[in-house]
Image (cartoon, grey):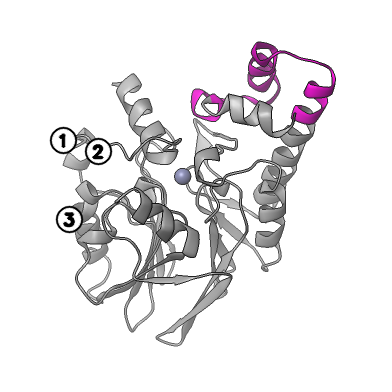
Amino acid sequence: MRHLRMRWLLAACMMLGAPPVPVQAAQPAYLTSVLKVRQLHPDMYVIEGPANGEVPNPNMIIYVTGAGVVVVDPWFAVDYRHVVAAIRSVTSEPVRYVVNTHFHEDHSGANGEWPVGVVIIAQDNSRLHMLEKAMPGPPNTTFSDQLTLYLGGKTVQLRYLGPGHTDGDIAVYFPEWKTVCLGDLMAGTNGVTNPVVDYANGGTLAAWPRALDKSLAFDVAEVVPGHGPIVGRDGLVAHRDKVAAIAGSLRGWDKEGRTVAQIHDLLISTYGFKPINLAPLDGLVAEFR
Ligand SMILES: [Zn+2]
């Protein structure tokens, strides 16, 4: 199962040039159990990806404003009814906004399942990628640089961070709790956060630290990564420094004339790269050549 899960994760989270891979026909076993909704703050909940980082589902935020719910990263279409049940377990307010941190299917696949009238939001480039790949539920609202939602006296700030994981990555910031959601600009696999660069869809490691710097321009106290444990500002700073160090190493290894096979091994031994991080190895080598 592990291998199958990894393939699914790779397909969902990267789509490296290939057309979107259909979600498994069979319902994943984890969805036969009730999704666990964890309260982060009185009006904010997270549905964590089961067994964080080992299966594709990202951390999903449920923000209850008093005038409707804001959902960040709604998982796959196959998950929709389970997600709605989980939301109903904490509030009867209708879902008003669904935000995609980027277009990958684990963050946007359920877009098309929400009732007409729900505002589905992503950055311009993310919508373009969904249209190119004929993915269901392309966002009905987009923005280029930033957009702010005001609902029930509460505020949610959406900001484009520039290319990194893809060319459509945004931060979703909740000033009330100084919480920022970063999508896969920060994503963990088995407890290690390392970059997964989707080169086929505008991703770049060289610009990734700059994107994280932009997210640090918010007054951040709490960081919700795309996958993996929620951390404080320090965790984000450490992640930013690590991504910058990886880029620096790749530049250095190229200057030293290392082979692709050597760089592969160095990324594992130096930074704990997992198969998902190594999938775009050729792109990583080419970008810093
Ligand atoms: Zn992704």
Amino acid at circle 3: Arg
Q: Given contact means CB atoms under 8 Å apart, are the residues at marks 2 and 1 in contact?
A: yes
How far across and how far down the image is residue 160, in percent?
Answer: 58, 64
Q: Quadrant of residue 270?
A: top right
Q: Is residue 91 above or below residue 15?
A: below
Tell me what residue is drawn at x 63 percent, y 43 percent: 204
Left or right: residue 42 versus residue 236 is left
- The 10 Å Cα crowd at callout 1, few under 14, some 14 to 19, many 20 or more, is few
Q: Which residues are magenta?
A: 250-278
Amino acid at circle 1: Ala
Q: Which residue is mark 2?
A: 22
Q: Given contact means CB atoms under 8 Å apart, are the residues at marks 2 and 3 in contact?
A: no
**CA–CA distance in space, label 2 to label 3:** 18 Å
- Front label number (2 vs 1): 2
Left or right: residue 229 versus residue 54 is right
Q: Regarding mark 3 in the picture, which secondary structure is present there?
A: helix
Q: Which residue is mark 3?
A: 81
Q: Is residue 203 visible?
A: yes
**CA–CA distance in space, label 1 to label 3:** 16 Å
Q: What secondary structure do most residues of the magenta stretch adopt?
A: helix
Q: Is mark 3 within 8 Å of ligand 1?
A: no
How far across and how far down the image is residue 237, in percent?
Answer: 71, 50
Residue closer to the observer: 207 or 27: 207
The N terminus lies in which quarter of the figure? top left
Residue closer to the observer: 237 or 41: 237
Q: Quadrant of residue 88?
A: bottom left
Tell me what residue is drawn at x 60 percent, y 30 percent: 283
Among the two numbered marks 2 and 3 on one chain, the one whose residue lies closer to the N terminus: 2
Q: Which residue is mark 1?
A: 25
Among the two numbered marks 1 and 3 on one chain, the one whose residue lies closer to the N terminus: 1
